Structures are given as structure tokens and as C-alpha cells.
Amino acid sequence: MERALRYVPRVAIFLAGVAAGTLTLSRRERGGMDPAADQLKRSLADLESRLAAQETANAIVHKRIEARLDGHAAKLAEVPSVAQLTAAVEQLLTRTMSSLDERLTTQAHSIEVLRTTVSQTDSLLERVLESLDALQTHTDPAGLSSDASSQQPTV
């Protein structure tokens, strides 16, 4: 029974199609179409032309959108990835830090050389001053007595 109920809607649609076909055939045989059918045909043709125009317009818009999407995809392909940017920044920082380390090492070496030079200069200057003092004390006792006698007033 359930199987028969499944076929009832299909059979009803089939019979409606047969009835519509019979009515259409009988009207064609009569020779003319009524004015409402002509107006319906014109409306249908107008609707089809508007639909075709809309489809053409939609196709044009679709092509424009596709072209823009392709352009955006090309631009996006040119943009470096996050990994590439990160690698470039890391490489730049590595170079900068290496350069900074080299400069600091060079400056530390220069400071050490300067300290050594200053120490040597101090030592040499101290020796020179000691030598001058020794020369002055060595020559001074004779010079002091002659200076002292010439400075003493005569009474």
C-alpha cells in the first residue's frame, strides 16, 4: 500500500501534463491564439531579453572582479612572508651586533694601549725629573755658594 502511495503524486503530475497537452493541441488546431497568450509571449520575450542583459552585466562584473582578484594575488605573492622578514631582521641585527662587538673590542684595545703609553710616559717623565733633580743638586751646591757670596751684603 505504501508503495502505491509513492506513485500517486507522480501519476497525478503525469495526468496533468497530458491534460495540458490536450488543451494546447486543441487550441492550436483552432488556429488562433487569444490576445492574452500573445501578451504573455511578449512579456516572456521581454523578460528573457532583460535576463540576458542582466547575465551579460553580471558576466562583465564577474570578469572585473576576477581581474582584481588576480592583481591582488600577484601583489600578495610579491610580499615577503613573515619567516622571510624575521630572517632578514635577524641577519641585520646579527651584522649590527657583530660590528658593534668589533668596534668595542678595538676601543678596549686602544684604551689598553693608551694606558700602557701613559704609564710609560709617566715613568719616563719621572726619570727625567729625577735626573733633573740629580743634576740640579749636583751642580747646585757650587752654584749656591757663589750665589750666596754675591748676595751677601758687605759690611
Image (cartoon, rainbow, N blue to C red):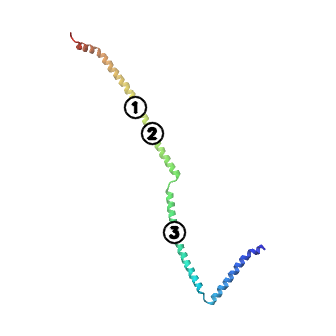
The CA span between labels 2 and 3 is 61 Å
As drawn, the label of residue 33 is none
Residue occupying the far right of the picture: 1
> Residue 139: percent from the left, percent from the top?
29, 16
Disc 2 target residue: 102
Query: Which quadrant of the view contains residue 17?
Result: bottom right
The mark closer to the camera, 2 or 3, is 3
Disc 1 target residue: 114
Identify residue type, mark 3. Val
* Residue drawn where x is 57% and y is 83% of the image: 39
The mark closer to the camera, 1 or 3, is 3
Q: Is residue 136 above or below residue 113?
A: above
Identify residue type, mark 1. Leu
Q: Earlier in the sequence, mark 1 or mark 2?
A: 2
Residues 18 and 115: in front is 18
Disc 3 target residue: 61
Count up the numbered dots.
3
> Residue 107: percent from the left, percent from the top?
42, 36
> Residue 49: percent from the left, percent from the top?
54, 77
The CA span between labels 1 and 3 is 77 Å
Residue occupying the far top of the picture: 155
Question: Is mark 1 in CB contact (under 8 Å) with mark 3?
Answer: no
Graded by Cα atoms within 10 Å as few (under 14), some (14 to 19) or many (20 or more), the crowding at tag 2 reads few
Q: Quadrant of the N terminus?
A: bottom right
